[in-house]
Amino acid sequence: MNEDFTVPEKSGAEILIDTLVEQGVDTVFGYPGGAVLPIYDALFQHTKIRHVLVRHEAGAAHAAEGYARSTGKPGVVLVTSGPGATNAVTGIADAFLDSIPLIVLTGQVATNLIGTDAFQEADTVGITRHCSKHNYLVKDPADLASTVREAFAIATKGRPGPVVIDIPKNVQVATAATDVKRPTASRFSPAGEADYSEINRAVELLANAKAPILYTGGGIINSGPEASAALRELAELSGAPVTSTLMGLGAYPASGDAWLGMLGMHGTYEANMAMNQCDVMLCLGARFDDRVTGRLDAFSPDSIKIHIDIDRSSINKTVRVDLPIVADVGAAMRQMIEVWKGRKYKAAALDDWWARIKGWRAVDCLSYAGSTQEIMPQYAIERLFAATKDKAPIITTEVGQHQMWAAQHFHFDAPNKWLTSGGLGTMGYGLPAAIGAQMGNPDALVIDIAGEASIQMNIQEMATATQYRLPVKVFILNNEWMGMVRQWQELTYESRFSESYSDSLPDFVALAEAYGWKGIRCSDPAQLDEAIAEMLSYDGPVMFDCRVHKTSNCFPMIPSGAAHTDMILNSDEVSGTMDDEAKALV
Amino acid sequence: MHIKQELTERHVLTLTVDNEAGTLARIAGMFTSRGYNIDSLTVADISEDHTTSRITIVTKGPPPVIDQIIAQCERLIPVHKVTDLTEAGPHVERELALVKVRGAGDQRVEAMRLADIYRARVIDATVNSFIFEITGGPDKIDTFVTLMREVGLVEVGRTGIVGLMRGSESS
C-alpha cells in the first residue's frame, strides 16, 4: 500500500480524548485501573483536560454531578472496568433520578474476553441500562467519535441525564482513521417550545385564577438561568405565590415576596396548605414526586392542574393533570409571558388568597425551641446562612435531617447554588459534590452541610480536596444519630431505635488534621458565630464538627401516607405509632 | 394489610426501533424494572438495510399504566415510534403456533378432524404423531390448544402476536 494515500490513524484512546476536547471538556473525574490504562496514557500530561483523581469511583460520579449542577456543563467520569464501573453505579443512578448530565466513560475487558468472566469484567452496559439515560458498548475505534458526540447530545438535551460509554481495552489501543464515520442522523429530538394553543389556555387559566400557585422544580434549574429569570417575571406578572421542590430551590429567590418556601414532606405549612387549597396549579419542571404529593387521593383535590415538563413520561405518571404541556419549561414560560403581555392581562385581584396565605404563614412552622445550653441544629444552619449569605455560597448536602434543615433554614436567591441528592437520596453525595463544584467554581465558597453518619460514606474524598488544594468546608451537624432514621423510628416504631446510633465516631478534628485539613469543634451556642467565622477565614479545607442537640426532629413533617393538610408541626403531635398501610408507604 | 389488585386492560403495542445491540434488552428490561407486564413479545428486522426492527408487545395494565408504558417506551433513545393498536382503531392480530399431538386410533382421527375444522395444516407426521401449524388470533389458538389437550397434546410453540392497522396507512 502506498503510505501517501492512507488516512492518518489514531488509537481509540487518542480519538476519545480528542473528541472530549472538541466537546469542550476541561475537567475529568476518575480513577485509573487496568482496563483504562491506554486512556490514562493518552491523558498523561495533557494540557487541555485536567484529571481529578478521586479516592473511590462513587466519589468521581458525585463530583461530576456537583460540577455539572453548579456549572450547567456536563460532568465527565472516567473509571476502569468491573469494580470501577460498579462503584460508579450509585452516582449514575443518582444523576438519572435528579436529571444531571454526566458522561461516564468505563473501561471494559478486550472484546475477545467479554463474556468469559475475565479479570475485572462486569456487564457494565447491562448493569447501567436502567439507571442511565442511554449507554453504549463501543466495539470499533472508528465508532468512538460519533458515539461520544451523540452521548453529549443525549446527556445534555431534553431532560438531562447520565450516559455511559463502555470501551473495551483493545478498542482503546486499536487504531482507526479519524472521523471516517459521520455522526448518524439525529435520532434524538427533545421538546422545545410549546404549542401556542396550550400556552394561551395556560395563561387564561392563570389570569382568571382566584387562588393560583406556581409549583416549581429542578427542571427550571436544568433549563438554565434564563428559565429562572422567566419564572421571576411570570411570578411578578401573575402575582401568584411560588413554592418549589427540593431540587428547584434557588430558581425563585427565597427573599422574593411571592416565596412560600419548599413544599412536601418537610416543606412549610404555608406551601403545603396553598398547594392543597389552590384553584389553579401551574407545575413547572417538577414531577409530582411522592415526597411532594403526600397521599395522592388527597393531593390538591379542587385545583385545575397545568403541568409543563420536557419529559412526556413525567406527565400523568402519578397525578392526572388537566392541561399537559410537553415543552422546555424555560421556553414555555417565556411564551406565557409574551402572551400575557400581548393580551395586556393584569395580575388578578388575589388579596383574599394572599390573606389566607398570611394566616398560614402566621403559624411560623419553622420555629423551634431555642437553647442557650446546646446548639440547636436549625440554629446552626441559620447562623451559617447569616455568616455566608453575602458570599453567594454553593451549598451541597448529604442526606437526612441535616439536608432538610438546610433546605428549610438556608435560603437561596440564585439557581445552581444548591446541590443535593433529591431523587435517589444518596448519603455520601455532599463531600464529592462539593469537590466537583469547587473544581468548576474555583473562587466560590463551597460548603457541604453534612451529618456525622452521611459524611463517613465518602470521607475518603478528603484526600482529593487536599491534593487539589480545594478549600471546601464541611459543616457537620453532629447529633450522634442517623437522625432521620431515628426520627422515623420515634414516630412510627414506638422509639425502638434499631441500629440508628452512630457509635464509634471518629474524632473529626483529629481526622481533619490527619488529612491536612483544619478541624474545628463547637458545642456552645455562644461561640458558634466565632467558630463559623474562623472556618470561613481559613484559606483551605475545613471540617467543622458542630455538636448539636441530639434528639431534635425535623418539623414540619407530613407523615407517611398523610395529606398535605395533616402536617405535624411539632413533636407534641406525634403518636409514635402508625398503621401498616402508612408504614408501607414510606 | 393486603396487596390490592387493579383492573387491567389488554393492549397491543407496536414499536419501530433501531436494530442495534441491546435494544431488545433495553425495552424488555424497562418493562421488568418498572413492574409492567409482557404477555407476548415478537421482534424482527423489517427494513431492507437491516437498520430497523418492529417489536410487537402485548401488555396489560390499568389505562394510566398503559399510557405510562407508551411514554416510557418513547423515552428510550433507540425507539422511534410507538403505536397502541388497541387504541388506534381497527387492526388485525395474528399468531402462529406449532402443536404436536401423539395418539392412535380414534384419538388420532379426532385430532385430524379438529385440525381440519380449525384450518391447521399438518407439517410433520409419524404413525403415532402429528405436528400442526395453525395461524390466527390468540383466542382461536388458545381454543385449538385446549382441544388438543383432550387428544394427546405433547407440546406447543407459539410465536407471539404481530399486528397491523387495517386500511392502507402505516401504523
Image (cartoon, rainbow, N blue to C red):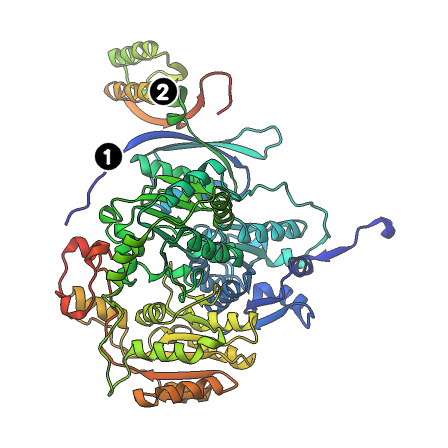
Do residues under tags 1 and 2 come within 8 Å of each other at their CB atoms? Answer: no
Using residue A235 as the reference point, say whether residue A211 is left or right of it: left
Regarding residue A99, the answer to whether it shows in the image is no
Using residue B52 as the reference point, say whether residue B96 is left or right of it: left
- Front-lying residue, A70 or A51: A70
Q: Secondary structure at mark 2?
A: loop
Residue A81's x, y, as percent? Answer: 52, 61
Residue B7 circle label:
1
Where is B66 relative to A354, above or below? above
Q: Chain of mark 1?
A: B
Regarding residue B19, the answer to whether it shows in the image is yes
Gap in Å between the C-alphas at discs 1 and 2?
23 Å
Using residue A271 as the reference point, say whether residue A563 is left or right of it: left
- Which mark is nearer the camera, 1 or 2? 1
Residue identified by numbered label 2: B137
For image coordinates 55% across by 68% down, the residue present is A29
**In the rendered structure, which amino acid carries the disc numbered 2?**
Gly
**In the rendered structure, which amino acid carries the disc numbered 1?**
Leu
The mark tally for this picture is 2
Determine if marks 1 and 2 fall on one subunit: yes
For image coordinates 19% across by 46% down, the residue present is B3
Q: Residues within 10 Å of mark 1 (few under 14, many from 20)?
A: few
Residue B135's x, y, as percent? Answer: 39, 18
Using residue B27 as the reference point, say whether residue A77 is left or right of it: right
- Front-lying residue, A196 or A293: A196
Residue A265's x, y, as percent? Answer: 28, 60
Query: Which of marks 2 and 1 precedes in the sequence?
Result: 1
Residue A134 circle label:
none
For image coordinates 17% across by 53% down, the residue present is A581
Where is B97 relative to A455, above or below? above
